[in-house]
Image: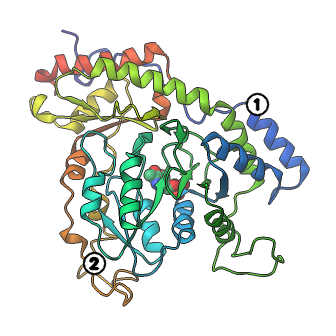
Amino acid sequence: MEKLAINGGEPVRTKPFPSWPVVGEEERNNLLEVFESKKWWYGERVKEFEEKFADFQDTQYGITCTNGTAALEVSLLSVGIGPGDEVIVPPYTFVATASAVLRVNAIPIFADISLETANLDPIDAEKKITEKTKAVIPVHFAGLPVDMDAFNNLAKKHNLKIIEDACHSWGSKWKNRGTGALGDCGAFSFQMSKNITSGEGGIILTDNQEIADNARSYINCGRGKDKPWYEHCLLGSNLRLTELQAAILLGQLTRLESQVLKREENAKYLNERLKGMLGIKIIDSDDSRITRRSYHLYQFRYLKEEWREVSREKFLDALQAEGIPASSGYPHPLYKNPLFLRKGKGPRFCPLSCPYYGKEMDYNQVSCPNTEKICKEAVWFSQSVLLGDREDMDDIISAVKKIRDNISVII
Ligand SMILES: Cc1ncc(COP(=O)(O)O)c(C=O)c1O
């Protein structure tokens, strides 16, 4: 038996995986052009990127903004969500999915995810609907599209808006249509770790002209369409993307499609080889309605009971020692964050204690068992790992197998 690297043996690999972001001449040339034009604001590059990205996601309108958090807030405002409204969200996501709801003075209500996909479960979401529910924000988590048919049916049945949190799903397709405007609108992030990035940045996509006009106004100080520059119609903010960011994004966009396909091919290879391994449950879906999957993360569940009770953290340390970078993801469901557990500790803040809602929301009572389980079991590989070659994928498989074979002697 080969000795584990964590026990002092030779690691499976010492070579680094591909670094992120990938940049090239496209970004450099675009940036220089914008720099020299001295038009760094409100210009042609932003417009060009909005059109090209909307087209890439099979959508009519694109409105860029400062980041994915702003894109979610603007989406909520643009579809008419406000004080006292309830919005159903998953607890297995970045905080912005829920905090954006609070930022527009509405109330996030948590529904559980599916253990198989880590995506919001439409059946549990329906159970959380009340007369105050106005919207649902399903997250295409890790780039895996949610069951949009189920969510659009819910919307029809209960008169709800669907805002897709597409901050992980640039390039993913549901029934051959890009994520982001499969519901009422969708929010994307271009933050540094994301599969297309300008350091910070975001976009709202929609096929609905009224939502698009609202979003454009909210991100541009509440200015009205075709109205004088100093006429302000909505309570907006300045959330505009710069020309320099758009110049980088246009460069990044030239590589996005081929990177999506490369990650998809590598993930398929990993799935085939890791699927049957005892103690590993791949988090993915073979739903044929998912016609393209853009992987932001490659994920599986580590079932400790099948690994002689060796903790996930120890497994991750062993993997790291073999030269394979992976992480455990969110430590707990969103509702366990101090932001939500304010009971008895300092002042409550609006909207959680404001008269619009008519009652006190107590997140101490929330329980989403699948989310709690996945928080304890998930193993995440970042998207850039999936840009490696076949040999790199084989190293991941070899390292997992090596740990599996030596689990009884792990120190
Ligand atoms: C699922 C999800 N939603 C929203 C966001 C917010 O995006 P940003 O960081 O660009 O504000 C993120 C980013 O990390 C995210 O992962």
Q: Is residue 128 left or right of residue 87?
A: left
Q: Residue at x 71, y 30 (%)?
A: 24
Residue under label 1, please give it: 25
In front here: 258 or 95? 258
Residue 232 visible to the viewer = yes
Q: Is residue 345 left or right of residue 46?
A: left
Residue 105 locus on image (x, y percent): 45, 78
Instruction: Assign a secondary structure to mark 1.
Output: helix
* Residue type, mark 1 in image: Glu
Residue under label 2, please give it: 361
Residue 14 locus on image (x, y percent): 42, 19
Q: Residue at x 19, y 21 (%)?
A: 404
**Badge 2 density bin: few <14, some 14–19, many ≥20, Cα 10 Å:** some
* Residue type, mark 2 in image: Met
How far apart are the two marked residues, 2 and 1, measured between alpha carbons? Answer: 52 Å
Q: Residue at x 17, y 37 (%)?
A: 311
